[in-house]
Image (cartoon, rainbow, N blue to C red):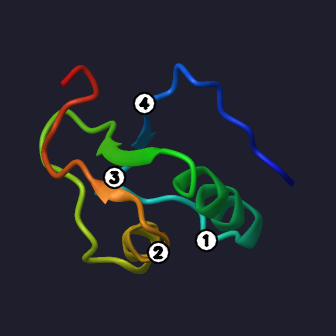
Amino acid sequence: MIIQLGMTHKAIVLQTYGVGNIPDRPEILDALRQVIAQTIVVNVTSCIKGGVNDAYHCGRILKDVGVISGSDMTTEC
């Protein structure tokens, strides 16, 4: 799978659940690696309180592929 981003993309914000978790699926991680090679990717949580962290495996895998933690930033931020 090849992902091409337009020149208007300066960054991508992932809105994940919980403390920044995503499914641990190779095709998702491979796609994220391709995107990260082209632009900045930041992870924020969909929760009202709290923030993204890598305390759990599914949160750590995003950090390991190069996604930047948005910590306690809201999606609007």
Query: Which residue is disc 4 drawn over?
Result: 10
Regarding mark 2 in the picture, which secondary structure is present there? helix
Determine which of the numbered discs, if any, sits on residue 61 in the image: 2
Q: Tag 4 or tag 3, which sits nearer the N-term?
A: 4
Q: Label 3: few (<14), some or many (≥20) within 10 Å?
A: some
Regarding mark 3 in the picture, which secondary structure is present there? loop
Q: Are marks 2 and 1 in contact (CB under 8 Å)?
A: yes
Give the CA separation, mark 3 to mark 1.
14 Å
x and y, in percent, of residue 19 in the image: 28, 57
Q: Label 2: few (<14), some or many (≥20) within 10 Å?
A: some
Amino acid type of the residue tagged 3 in the rendering = Gly
Query: Which residue is disc 3 drawn over?
Result: 18
Q: From the viewer's perspective, is 32 left or right of 76?
A: right
Give the CA separation, mark 4 to mark 2.
23 Å
x and y, in percent, of residue 44 in the image: 30, 43
Viewer-nearest residue: 46 or 74: 74
Of tags 4 and 1, the one toward the viewer is 4
x and y, in percent, of residue 70 in the image: 23, 48
Amino acid type of the residue tagged 2 in the rendering = Ile
